[in-house]
Image (spheres, helix red, strand yellow):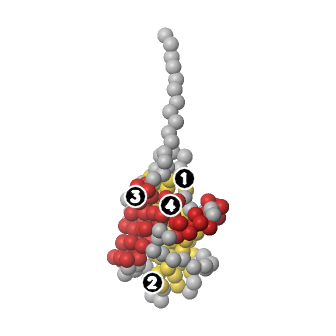
Amino acid sequence: MSSSSYSVSESQTFTLTHAKHMAAKVAADLMRLQRLYGKPSTQWISDYEEEVTAFLKAGYLDTVTYGFKRDGKWIEPTLKYTASELSSGGVDDTPGRIRPNADITGASFYSYMTYNDAWRNASQTERDAVKSQVPVSRGQANEPEVNGYLTSDNAYSSGGHTLNRSTVRSY
């Protein structure tokens, strides 16, 4: 009797379709924020979805945060997404599960994006090409601190990449 063994190597190309799948889940979360808290506007949700799609597809996204800021600090409800590659598999959760009834009195809606090493290593021409694809124009600012703590609660995956979502919680 003979036996044999084999291995399978899986290689995935991250496509625009994968990026759109993940960005649509972010947009669904933002629609939930809008329903519960009145912000962001439908136009901004569409713009943010385009931005996340472009930066995911280009491989430049590190983190992006959407939520409410009071006294210069993120408060509940705020959502932070961290992009990464997967070694295999991955969880693709259903969007939502945003807690209602947080106190946003005196707070304003805000968004903040950070970029990864690939962005820093890209040429200005490559960066400009991605920026030209999105309707969101970002300036320079320091990343706000968190008033409370971040808890990991969802992950959106496709094409070997993932967006891990963390939510700000109050103490």
Question: Marks 4 and 2: which is nearer the front?
Answer: 4
Q: Residue at x 51, y 26 (%)?
A: 6
Residue at numbered disc 1: 85
Q: Considering depth in this image, is 84 or 121 the residue closer to the camera?
A: 121
Question: Marks 1 and 4: which is nearer the front?
Answer: 4
Of mark 4 and mark 3, the one earlier in the sequence is: 3
Residue at numbered disc 4: 56
How far apart are the two marked residues, 1 and 3, measured between alpha carbons? 15 Å
* Mark 2 secondary-structure assignment: loop
Residue at numbered disc 2: 104
Q: Considering depth in this image, is 118 or 5 the residue closer to the camera?
A: 118
Does residue 107 show up? yes
How far apart are the two marked residues, 4 and 2, measured between alpha carbons? 30 Å
Residue 59 bears which disc, if any?
Answer: none
Q: Label 4 sits on what residue type?
A: Leu
Q: Considering depth in this image, is 114 or 136 the residue closer to the camera?
A: 136
Residue at numbered disc 3: 21
Q: Could you tell me if the residues under marks 2 and 1 are in contact, i.e. CB atoms within 8 Å?
A: no
Of mark 1 and mark 3, the one earlier in the sequence is: 3
Question: Marks 2 and 1: which is nearer the front?
Answer: 1
Q: Could you tell me if the residues under marks 4 and 3 are in contact, i.e. CB atoms within 8 Å?
A: no
37 in relation to 155, above or below: below
